């Protein structure tokens, strides 16, 4: 799999991309266009859970490489998404309790790439991201991961809270990073675990937070009150690594 992000332009090309199962992160559609082919594309986008943005003709012209976008441009993922079951299978194959990152609406591709890199180095078995209001597997994410995307499966789900409920049935416990929680050193983070990291600005959403079993705070001694999302992920991940190594 390469690092090249790519766009698909033209109505027939976009329709065929959906029908072939190609993963598409975002769809840019000419605002106000309601003709048959565009409506077909919008139906396919809805079925696939693609984020749709309505833009002006000038914006589409700027994005277009060919000048023949016909009112629609799809932005395709640079990498293929895994399924949640694939991540659990990786843990089973290694004979290890599952260790998974779940990212609640991370929007910065550099943060996502850095978290995937940290996940790989910390021995996590995969990363789960939501389909909506979050960055997908773009070329920037791939580059920032420094190759980790070749080895760490990333699954994309419609509902993160429901995914947590499903994974609890598989025996996982969930901890989210939040300033108001228990100091992470005082928590038992061993065993099958999912680490929930929130949005760069808003943090972990209320509904997702309510599904977590533990809330971990990272001790901070400086003059500002929060860490970058990818740094917070790294700090919490390596506390899990430390506890796992202790046995």
Image (cartoon, rainbow, N blue to C red):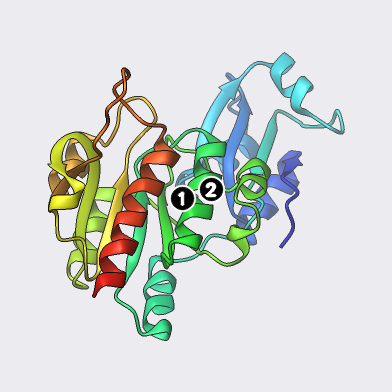
In this rendering, does residue 159 appear at all?
Answer: no
The residue under the point 76% across, 39% down is 9
User: Residue 238 appears at what percent x and percent y?
Assistant: 36, 56
Q: Which mark is residue 44?
A: 2
User: Residue 150 appears at what percent x and percent y?
Assistant: 62, 64
How many residues crowd around disc 2 within 10 Å: few (fewer than 14), some, or many (20 or more)?
some
The answer to the question of whether label 2 and label 1 lie on touching residues, with beta carbons closer than 8 A, is yes
User: In terms of depth relative to the viewer, which is nearer, 40 or 1?
Assistant: 1
User: In terms of depth relative to the viewer, which is nearer, 145 or 160?
Assistant: 145
Specify whether 32 is left or right of 59. Answer: left
Cα distance between the residues tagged 2 and 1: 5 Å
Which element type, helix, strand or loop, lies under badge 2? helix
Specify whether 104 is left or right of 80. Answer: left
Specify whether 191 is left or right of 112. Answer: left
User: Residue 215 appears at what percent x and percent y?
Assistant: 16, 45
Name the residue beneath numbered marker 1: 47
Which element type, helix, strand or loop, lies under badge 1? helix
The residue under the point 27% across, 37% down is 204
In this rendering, does residue 225 appear at all?
Answer: yes
Image quadrant where residue 202 sits? top left
């Amino acid at each position: 799999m390469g690092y090249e992000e790519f766009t698909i332009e033209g109505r027939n090309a976009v329709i065929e991309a959906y029908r072939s199962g190609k993963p598409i992160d975002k769809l840019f559609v000419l605002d106000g266009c309601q003709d048959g082919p565009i409506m077909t594309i919008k139906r396919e986008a809805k079925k696939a859970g693609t984020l749709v943005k309505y833009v002006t003709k000038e914006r589409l012209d700027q994005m277009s490489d060919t000048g023949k976008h016909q009112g629609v441009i799809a932005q395709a993922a640079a990498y293929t998404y895994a399924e949640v079951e694939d991540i659990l299978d990786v843990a089973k194959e290694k004979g290890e309790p599952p260790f998974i990152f779940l990212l609640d609406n991370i929007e910065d591709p550099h943060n996502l790439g850095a978290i995937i890199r940290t996940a790989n180095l910390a021995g996590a078995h995969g990363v789960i991201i939501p389909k909506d209001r979050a960055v997908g597997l773009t070329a920037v994410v791939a580059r920032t991961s420094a190759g980790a995307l070749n080895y760490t499966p990333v699954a994309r789900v419609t509902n993160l809270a429901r995914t947590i409920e499903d994974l609890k049935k598989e025996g996982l416990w969930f901890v989210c990073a939040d300033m108001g929680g228990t100091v992470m050193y005082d928590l038992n983070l061993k065993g099958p675990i999912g680490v929930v990291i929130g949005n760069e600005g808003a943090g972990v959403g209320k509904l997702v937070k309510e599904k977590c079993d533990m809330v971990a705070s990272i001790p901070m001694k400086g003059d500002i009150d929060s860490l970058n999302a990818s740094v917070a992920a790294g700090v919490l991940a390596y506390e899990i690594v430390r506890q796992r190594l202790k046995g």
